[in-house]
Image (spheres, helix red, strand yellow):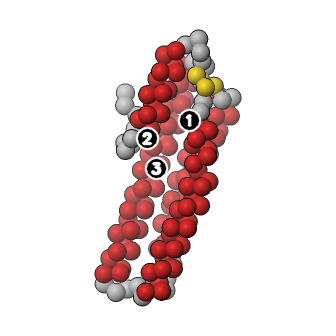
Amino acid sequence: MNLLPTLLALLVCTIAAIGSSRNLNRTYARLEGEIRSQDDLLIVREVINLSMLQAFILIMAEAFWVIGFLIAIYFGFLRRGDILIHGGTFAGGLTLIVAYAKPIEKRFRGLKANPLKPEIGETFARWKKEWREPRIRLSE
């Protein structure tokens, strides 16, 4: 049994999730929890775009792992016990990654917008909605 492909897929997923989470954390701290100006809004836009791209990379790594896993099962490269170990390792690893990253993303989504500039709040609300959609970047 060789866990290397599973561990490599988890490594790619972990790097993408940690990179995204660090960017969200740094930007949240830099903005002190509030989007005050159009310049702040541009910073938030770039961080969201990067987060969306990193999520895409994470999903592609998962998809490639699943495809490889199914091919290995189909051609008999994995025994029954190996299937459970690989599947359990990958599922457990993904669960830990999501448990780490989700609260950070949730806090970032809670950024406050300058109440004196309602267009900032409207734009950020639209972006948060788009962030939940399956896309790689925010619309223009």
Q: Earlier in the sequence, mark 2 or mark 1?
A: 1
CA separation in Å, label 1 and label 3: 15 Å
In the rendering, at what x and y percent does residue 84 appear? 48, 80
Q: The disc labelled 1 sits on which kind of residue? A: Arg
Q: Is residue 17 visible?
A: yes
Answer left or right for 53 relative to 113.
left
Q: What's the residue type where badge 2 is placed? A: Arg
Q: Quadrant of residue 35?
A: top right
Residue type at tag 3:
Ala
Against 120, is 49 above or below? below
Above-or-below relation of 85 to 22: below
Q: Is residue 18 visible?
A: no
Q: Residue at x 37, y 27 (%)?
A: 140
Identify residue for label 2.
Answer: 132
For label 3, the residue is: 55
Task: Give the residue displayed 53% in from the left and 73% down from the top.
Answer: 89
Q: Is residue 126 above or below residue 15?
A: above
| Secondary structure beneath label 1 | helix
How far apart, in angstroms, are the residues tagged by discs 2 and 3? 11 Å
Please give the residue where the numbered disc 1 appears in the rendered image.
109
For label 2, the SS is: loop
Mark toward the start of the polypeptide (2 vs 3): 3
